[in-house]
Amino acid sequence: MEGNIERLIKKIKQLDNELRRELHKKQDEFFYHIDQKKVRFEKEVRKQHKNLVKGLSRYFLEASLLNILTVPVIWGCLFPALLLDLCVTLFQAICFPVYKIPKVRRSKYIVIDRHALSYLNLIEKINCFYCGYFNGLLGYVQEVAARTEQYWCPIKHARPVGLIHSRYKFFFDYGDAEGFRQRIAEVRRDFADLEKKLDD
């Protein structure tokens, strides 16, 4: 059974790498390259993009009234998100050195680059900034939590979980009492795969 789980996790990783390669190919298709974390479009493409900007008055006229009315609810989530960001960043800064867990690089998860697209108007750029921040924050928080869980409670669940995080493959099977007691100290310290990666 364990062999099947490891095989599936390896397959997921391979598919993730394949997806990254396919996304990288889009740079050629849409005529841009990344130079020191900045996206650079070819001059002619930038001109075309500017011609496609939807003006703010047209944007608001075409917007659904219900969408406009939900804006305060969406933006109200920003304050808890900022607090979560601060708490998790402080948590890992204080606790991870104590537990000897490699720190999660926040900038790997929170990627803000869509505001550079010249075919977006100001409102669309702000919305894209918000979505990039919020979704990146959740990925960052999940990775901090996953590494913490590996240290404190590396046991798989009996029931299926909605999303399997990056450290789950190192966890003990549910009910493996002997394995847990014999190897808990070893699993708590097993972050060797992260230390091999330069980007972590």
Image: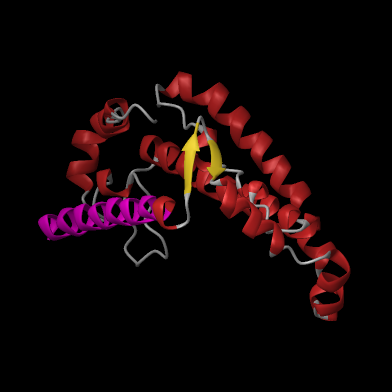
Quadrant holding the N terminus:
bottom left
Q: Position of residue 164 (x, y in %)?
A: 37, 56
Q: Residue drawn at (68%, 53%), measured in percent from left and top?
A: 118
Quadrant holding the C terminus:
top left
Q: Residue drawn at (73%, 60%), measured in percent from left and top?
A: 124
Would you say residue 30 is visible in this rendering? Answer: yes
Side (left or right) of 143 relative to 133: left
Range drawn in magenta: 1-26
Front-most of 7 and 20?
A: 20
Q: Where is residue 132 in the image (x, y as percent from the top left)?
A: 61, 51
Q: Where is residue 17 in the image (x, y as percent from the top left)?
A: 29, 50
Front-most of 143 and 189?
A: 143
Residue 50 lies within the magenta run:
no
Residue 111 image-quadrant placement: top right
Residue 15 lies within the magenta run:
yes
Give the prevailing secondary structure in the magenta stretch: helix
The single residue placed furthest to the front in the displayed view is 44
Side (left or right) of 187 relative to 96: left
Side (left or right) of 65 relative to 13: right
Above or below, 112 against 89 in this view is: below
What is the image's colouring?
secondary structure
Front-most of 95 and 50?
A: 50
Residue 137 image-quadrant placement: top right
Q: Residue drawn at (61%, 43%), measured in percent from left and top?
A: 112
Q: Residue drawn at (21%, 34%), measured in percent from left and top?
A: 183
Would you say residue 156 is visible in this rendering? Answer: no
